[in-house]
Image: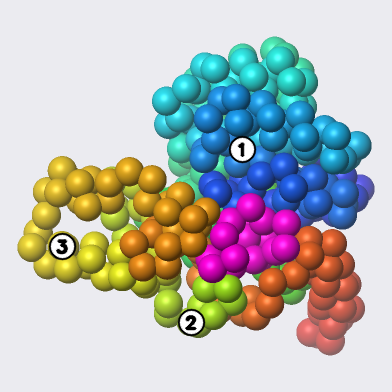
Amino acid sequence: MNKITQLFNIKYPIIQGGMIWNSGYKLASAVSNAGGLGLIGAGSMYPEVLREHIQKCKKSTDKPFGVNIPMLYPNIEEIMNIVVEEGVKIVFTSAGNPKTWTSFLKEKGITVVHVVSSSIFALKAQEAGVDAIVAEGFEAGGHNGRDETTTLTLIPMVKEKIQIPIIAAGGIATGRGMLAVMILGADGVQVGSRFAASIESSSHDNFKQTIVNVKEGDTQLTLKELAPVRLIKNKFYQDVQALYEKCPSKEELTELLGRARAKKGMFEGDLEEGELEIGQIAGIIHEILPVEQIIKQMMADFELASKEKAKFEF
């Protein structure tokens, strides 16, 4: 039995990334109903909105689902209490020290997974007592590691250091990608971009269509001084690059970023002034599909690739 399917009591070792402005209850419940693990993305929700999404998710699926919580969240205490009050059984934490909340959540019987971008942070997460880690390479969309370590090199490096299960993330949108990282030592995968371009994603149709149009080289990691983020090269991105030519201060970058840029782009569909976060793998996403079909395709692709692998045995 696979360590990840066992840990979460799911059919397939496929986790949907808890992406801001994409991962509402419709996406999370659809992924869980299709045999993966759906995650509600708390990062773009006020506490009461999160509570509402958890309650709707419980009505929409009888399968396990979880909540992704970036720990930089201003209402973090309130968010954690809501998760406990609503009986959420799985929490993925990111963007912060895993020691801060892991023991609190574990004492409440919650399975805890922490997202890391290096083997050093993977070790810290293991020491903090998490049940598994997501090791995310810099191909991933959204906020990212500063070291620019790719998934292909990150997974074996993390595998060498830790004993707990590893979920690979960054650049995975197909069953072949899933098989590749599992051969490298991952026990499962976290998929973001492919689910962002799904019917059930809560993002704007303009953004979904843009994902489908993205080609190789159309995304870039930027804003490292604030928090590294991979963006589609739209007008806002070009404005950031123009400002970089003037050697800006952190304050000037923060001022340009302003408030609610990601909401403007991904949720409201402003393709010019919004922040459009997506992974490099968007270059091979060519259509917006229902979640069930995405997971079926991934698993069929995985099975076929597993059989083909035999050709390479010497």
Q: Which residue is depicted at the point 61% across and 37% down?
A: 68
| Disc 3 target residue | 243
Residue 68 circle label: 1
Q: Name the secondary structure under disc 3.
A: helix
Q: Quadrant of the C terminus?
A: bottom right
In front: 200, or 302? 200
Magenta part of the protein: which range?
192-208
In front: 262, or 181? 262
Q: Which residue is depicted at the point 29% across and 55% down?
A: 223
Relative placement, left or right, of 81 versus 226 is right
Relative placement, left or right, of 55 versus 145 is right
Q: Is residue 260 above or below residue 149?
A: above
Q: Position of residue 119 (x, y in %)?
A: 50, 46
Tell me if residue 36 is in the magenta stretch: no
Looking at the image, is mark 3 or mark 1 earlier in the sequence?
1
Q: Position of residue 127 (x, y in %)?
A: 56, 27
For the residue marked with disc 3, what is the amino acid? Answer: Leu
Q: Are marks 3 and 1 in contact (CB under 8 Å)?
A: no
Q: Position of residue 257 (x, y in %)?
A: 28, 50
Q: Residue furthest left?
A: 246
Q: CA distance from mark 3 to mark 1?
A: 32 Å
Q: For the residue carrying disc 3, how many other residues have a C-alpha within 10 Å: few (<14), some (14-19), or many (20+)?
A: some
Looking at the image, is mark 2 or mark 3 earlier in the sequence?
2
Q: Position of residue 36 (x, y in %)?
A: 81, 51
Tell me if residue 206 is in the magenta stretch: yes
Q: Is residue 309 above or below residue 101?
A: below
For the residue marked with disc 2, what is the amino acid? Answer: Glu
| Disc 2 target residue | 216
Looking at the image, is mark 2 or mark 1 earlier in the sequence?
1
